[in-house]
Image (cartoon, helix red, strand yellow):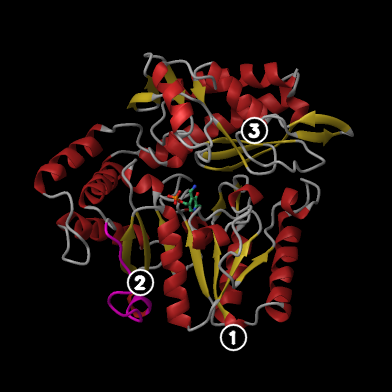
Amino acid sequence: AEASTSMSAFGERHVAKGVGRLTQNVLKKGSGSYVWNDEGRKMLDFTAGIGVTSLGHCHPAVSEAAHEQIDEIVHAQCAIGYSSKYLELCQRLIPRFAKIDPRLDSFFLWNSGSEAVEASIKLAREVTGKNNVIVVQGSYHGRTYGAMALTKSKTIYFERQGPLMPGVFVTSFPFYAQLGVAPTTPEADMVETALHQLRLLLAQQTAPSETAAILLEPVMGEGGYVPAPPAFLQGLRKMASDNGILLIHDEVQCGVGRTGDFWATEASGVQPDILIFAKGIANGFPLSGIVSRKELTDKQKPGTMGGTYAGNAVSCAAACAVLETMDKEPILDNVTARSKQLVDFLEGLKKSSPAGHLIEQVRGRGLMIGLQFKKDLISGDSNHTATNKEWLVDGQKREQLAPKISKRCAEKGMLLLSTSVFDVIRFIPALTISEEEMSEGLKIFQEAFEEVAK
Ligand code: PMP
C-alpha cells in the first residue's frame, strides 16, 4: 500500500486520486501468473489485471502476434478500410458463437468494455425504435457516461455525476444478499421473486412499448461474483421475446473461457440478441466488441458506429493469437480443474479454519469465484480501496474483512481483489494458472484471512 520507491512516490503525487489503487507498486514485468515491481519483487497475480490477462501476462504467442502486426500496420482505421486481423478475428469468433446462436455473426469492435456496452444500447434503441433500458440491481457496465448510468453496484461510481442518461430502470437480481433473504433460500424462489418484480416493472414503470432492452451480466462481476441462475436468464429471454424487447448479455468479465465454457451464456441455453465481449479477448491489449444478428445490425445507417481506434489492428492480432491458443491448448479443462481445486480449498477453510464461521458462501463458476463473508448490514462507504468499513455480524460491529485481506495479501506478495458493497473476495487468476501456483495463492490467502479475522 505504501509508496516504496521514488517512482511509486512520484505516482502517488502525480497520478490523480480518482484512480483507486490496491497497491502503489510500479509493475515492471509480467509473466504467466506473476508480476514483478520495480524493486524486483515477485508477486503472484490472482487478479489477472481484473480478468484481462487470461492466458497469463505476456503470453509468448500473443506477444509474438502483436510484434509481427506492429511491423505490418498499426492503425488501419475502421472508417477508412479493414485490417486483415479485424476480419480474421471475426472469422475466428463466428464458430465460437455456434453453441449459443449461429446467427450471431455481425460485429462491431471497440476498445473498452464501456464503449461496447454503449454500442449495444445504441443498436438496441435503433433496432426497436424504443428508449428505455432495464438493468439489474448490482450491475456493472462501466464508467463512461452511458455505461455509468447502467451501473447499479456501488454509488461511488456515479456520486455527484448526475443527471445521468435517462431511461434506465432497475429490476431485482436473484442473489440472496441483494434480496435480503437467507443464503439458504432456494434459487427457484429467488428467481420467481425477481421475475415477478420485472413483470411489475413492465406494468408499472416502463411499458414494453417503451422498453428497448434488458441488459445483464450472465455472471455478475463487480456486483459480487454471482452467476445468474439459468432459469432467471431463461425467464428474461421469454419476457423479452414476448414483449418485443432485446436481451443483451454483457460478457465483458465472464466471457472468453472465464467460467469454463467459452461464453458464460452457453450454460443457460439462452440466445441473447446482442453479446458484449472485451477483457480476456486480447489478453491485455485494448479491445472490445459486440456481436448480433445481421438482420439487426443492418438497421443501422453507416456512420452511426465507429471510433478512431476502434478494433485496432495490433489488438485484433493479439486476439487472434488468444483464440488460436485456446483452440490448441486445453485451457478450458485447466479452468475446470483449477476451479475445483479452488472451491474445494475454500469450502474446506469454511469447515475447518478457526475463522471459518465468518465465511457465508463460496460461489461462482470456473475461475470467477467469490467468497462471501457473513454480514447483517451493508457498508455505506463502498469504495473498495477503503479499509475502514464496519459491518454488524451476529449483532457485533466489525469491519469488512475482504478489503483488509486483499491489502494483507499484497503485503505478502499476492494480488487479490475484493468487490461489491457486500463483503466479498474475488478469485480471478489467469486461466492458465498451474496447480502449484493455485496452492501457493491459497496458502497466502489462508494466512491473510486467519490473521485479519483474529
Ligand atoms: N462490463 C463488465 C461486466 C465489466 O466487468 C466491465 C469492467 N470491469 C465493464 C463492462 C467495463 O469495461 P471497461 O473497464 O473496459 O470499460
Residue on which the image places disc 1: 209
Q: Does the residue labelled 3 lie within 8 Å of ligand 1?
A: no
Residue on which the image places disc 3: 386
Left or right? Give the position of 42 relative to 377. Answer: left
Q: Main secondary structure of the magenta part?
A: loop
Instruction: Say whether disc 3 or disc 1 marks the residue closer to the N-terminus.
Output: 1
Instruction: Say whether disc 2 or disc 3 marks the residue closer to the N-terminus.
Output: 2
Residue 154 visible somewhere in the drawing: no
The image shows residue 48 at horizontal and vertical percentages of: 43, 35
Q: Which span is picked out in magenta?
A: 296-308
Residue on which the image places disc 2: 103
> What residue is shown at x 74% (from left), y 25% (from top)?
356
Q: At label 1, which amino acid type do we have?
A: Ser
> What residue is shown at x 41% (from left), y 29% (from top)?
433
Q: At label 3, which amino acid type do we have?
A: Ala
Q: How crowded is mark 1: few (under 14 residues within 10 Å), some or many (20 or more)?
A: some
Left or right? Give the position of 364 relative to 182. Answer: left
Q: Is residue 292 magenta?
A: no
Q: How far apart are marks 3 and 1 (CA)?
A: 43 Å
Between circles 3 and 1, the one closer to the viewer is: 3
The image shows residue 449 at horizontal and vertical percentages of: 66, 22
